[in-house]
Image (spheres, rainbow, N blue to C red):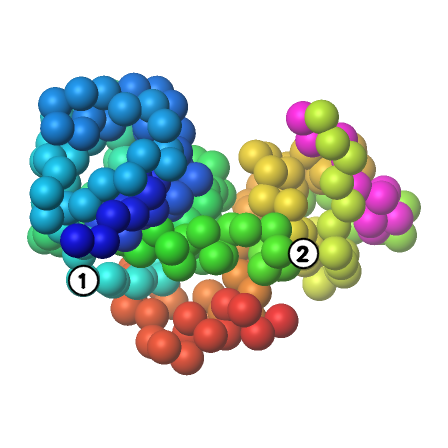
Amino acid sequence: MTKKRLSKALAGAGVASRRAAEELIFMGRVQVNGETVRVPQTLVDFASDRISVDGSLISKEQEKVYYMVNKPKGMICSNVRVGRRPIILDMFPHSNERLFTIGRLDRDTTGLLIVTNDGHFAQQVIHPSSNVIKEYLVKTVQEIEVKHLETLSEGARVDDKWVKPVSVRKVRRGTFKIAVKEGRKHEVRIIAERAKLDVVELTRIRIGGLLLGSLEEGSFRALTENDKKQIFSL
């Protein structure tokens, strides 16, 4: 009998990334053999322990699946529906896996998103040591001038930390590309706001070396093994 840490077991079962699984445990949403457990390091085994999340039994590790999605505007990156708002998982109505997104895009942002049930892979992608850079295409009301690019390159304070983009460059009159690696909420919008730019459209076009390419908005496809390697190639 091989026991695993509870957070690792939940990630392996496709419940969430390991970090998100730890949060579920801390929140008291995970039960082992009928008792709420709040310690992620608790050792468990699917063969001998009854593990549940929010009352739903998690019986075994799932076959791992990986998708790249071109997220449409208005869709929320969440497993929990608020009111009648559409969520990413609505795109996978016939899936038997417990899918989740690796990271998030806000409701009004479109573009490249990875959906999986592999918590270990998700942890690899989001862990700071992987240095996975995300690139966005930003359309603004104003024409992009040198002063804007200079201010964008300085970055901005996001929450409690000053963050600077990896690169910024003008594409055309009212459009620029910006690459970041912090992954903080609304990071690109806050940087643009500091440069006094009004964002009209925001699209993530790259994660690491994986490009959104010609995938249509609202569509998805399975990731190939090469696609997965591309994420860590830059």
Q: Position of residue 50 (x, y in %)?
A: 11, 35
Q: Amino acid at mark 1?
A: Glu
Q: Quadrant of residue 111?
A: bottom left
Q: Position of residue 215 (x, y in %)?
A: 38, 67
Q: Decide: is 174 above or below 29.
A: below
**Residue drawn at the location 13% of the way across and 50% of the way down:** 60
Upstream in sequence: badge 1 or badge 2: 1
Query: Is residue 51 a member of the stretch shown in magenta?
Result: no
**Residue drawn at the location 23% of the way across and 20% of the way down:** 36
Q: Where are the magenta residues, as a range?
A: 149-159
**Residue drawn at the location 74% of the way across and 31% of the way down:** 161
Say which of 82 and 47 sits in front: 47
Q: Say which residue label 2 marks.
A: 179
Structural crowding at the residue carrying mark 2, measured as other residues with C-alpha within 10 Å and reported as few (<14), some (14–19) or many (≥20): many
Q: Secondary structure at mark 2?
A: strand
- Residue 144 is left or right of residue 139, and the answer is right
Q: Which quadrant would the C terminus be assigned to in this image?
A: bottom right
Q: Say which residue label 1 marks.
A: 63
Q: Which residue of the protein is positioned furthest toward the front in this rendering?
A: 1
Residue 139: in sight, yes or no?
no
Say which of 15 and 106 sits in front: 15
The answer for how far apart the CA atoms under marks 1 and 2 are is: 33 Å
- Residue 184 is left or right of residue 143, and the answer is left
- Residue 140 is left or right of residue 109, and the answer is right
Structural crowding at the residue carrying mark 1, measured as other residues with C-alpha within 10 Å and reported as few (<14), some (14–19) or many (≥20): few
- Residue 82 is left or right of residue 103, and the answer is left
Q: Secondary structure at mark 1?
A: loop
**Residue drawn at the location 50% of the way across and 68% of the way down:** 231
Say which of 194 and 131 sits in front: 131
Q: Amino acid at mark 2?
A: Ala
